[in-house]
Image (cartoon, grey):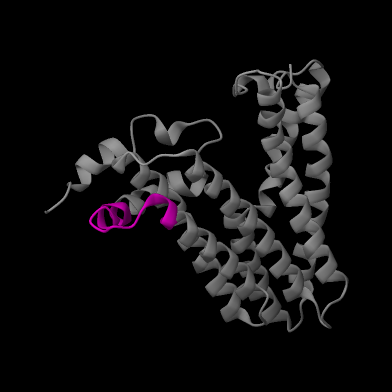
């Protein structure tokens, strides 16, 4: 069997409006990866690979990126960044393959979330390990602290749906997350969102920043740039953990 054409696959796997979903698509996906992932999905559609198997491979790629980032040298930062791009490619393709094959499932959604948790934590822990002169030291601790913060931030969002489900309420709408009981809090959230500082702990941005600091470290002959990035990550993760919790409690998502 020749299988579907790329155009036929795109109509089903990347339906109209899919890339414009609120909070549903990473900028890298919109900018370039969705243009590439459809070809990977087209090739995979001719194989017995299932969407969930693809998600498992995605998770492995993300975790291995964190392990590689922990190694010294510029080559390790380059390879980690490339592995994160593979992670993103598979993150796009697993959903596309699921829509094409009709094999969407709650297990797939769950595994996708697990992959995101593991990848963010692995990269932050790896960055902290990379920044350590004598292993382990305080940079190692800060890397793991930032990893814990990244997990807690995601858990805070996921637990909203757990709380609503236990209360017999439907899933929260996107709009409820931007509706606040206090106008001042709403303004504060918009200001913080405009800074985009929360992206520093996300895999795509973090891998590129780690690569940039690795280049600077090669030029300067020390680990100062990487260490500054570790400190920035742990501060950002700590602030986000607190502010995200306050934002949820002050919004109408639990109403």
Q: Position of 84 compared to 149: left or right?
A: left
The range drawn in magenta is: 39-54
Which of 216 and 167 lies nearest the eye of the viewer?
A: 167
- In the image, residue 113 sits, relative to residue 170, either above or below, namely below
Q: Image point 66% across, 74% down: which residue?
A: 214
- In the image, residue 191 sits, relative to residue 228, either above or below, namely above
Q: Indicate the quadrant where residue 166 lies.
A: top right
Say if the magenta span includes residue 44. Answer: yes
Residue 246 x %, y %: 83, 31
Quadrant where the C terminus lies? top right
Residue extending furthest toward the right: 138
Quadrant where the N terminus lies? bottom left
- In the image, residue 219 sits, relative to residue 231, either above or below, namely below
Residue 12 visible: yes
Q: Position of 252 compared to 106: left or right?
A: right
Q: Image point 78% across, 64% down: which residue?
A: 143
Q: Image point 63% across, 68% down: which residue?
A: 66
How many numbered badges does the structure rendering display? 0
Residue 134 x %, y %: 84, 83
Magenta-drawn stretch, dominant element (helix, strand or loop): helix
Q: Position of 104 compared to 167: left or right?
A: left
Residue 36 x %, y %: 34, 54
């Amino acid at each position: 069997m020749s299988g579907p054409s790329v155009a036929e696959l795109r109509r089903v796997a990347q339906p109209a409006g899919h890339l414009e979903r609120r909070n549903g698509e990473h900028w890298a996906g919109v900018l370039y990866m969705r243009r590439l992932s459809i070809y990977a999905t087209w090739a995979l559609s001719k194989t017995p690979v299932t969407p969930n198997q693809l998600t498992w491979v995605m998770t492995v790629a993300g975790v291995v990126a964190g392990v590689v980032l922990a190694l010294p040298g510029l080559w390790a930062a380059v390879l980690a960044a490339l592995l994160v791009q593979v992670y993103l490619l598979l993150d796009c393709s697993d959903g596309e393959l699921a829509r094409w094959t009709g094999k969407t499932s709650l297990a797939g959604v769950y595994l996708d979330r697990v992959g995101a948790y593991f990848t963010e934590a692995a990269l932050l822990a790896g960055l902290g390990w990379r920044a350590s002169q004598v292993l382990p030291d305080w940079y190692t601790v800060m890397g793991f602290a930032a990893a814990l913060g990244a997990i807690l931030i995601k858990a805070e969002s996921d637990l909203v749906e757990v709380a609503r489900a236990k209360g017999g309420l439907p899933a929260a709408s996107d709009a409820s997350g931007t509706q606040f009981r206090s106008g001042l809090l709403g303004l504060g959230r918009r200001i913080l969102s405009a800074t985009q500082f929360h992206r520093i702990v996300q895999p795509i941005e973090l891998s590129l920043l780690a690569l940039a600091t690795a280049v600077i470290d090669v030029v300067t002959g020390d680990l100062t740039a990487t260490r500054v990035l570790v400190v920035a990550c742990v501060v950002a993760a700590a602030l986000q953990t607190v502010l995200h919790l306050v934002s949820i409690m002050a919004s109408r998502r639990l109403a």
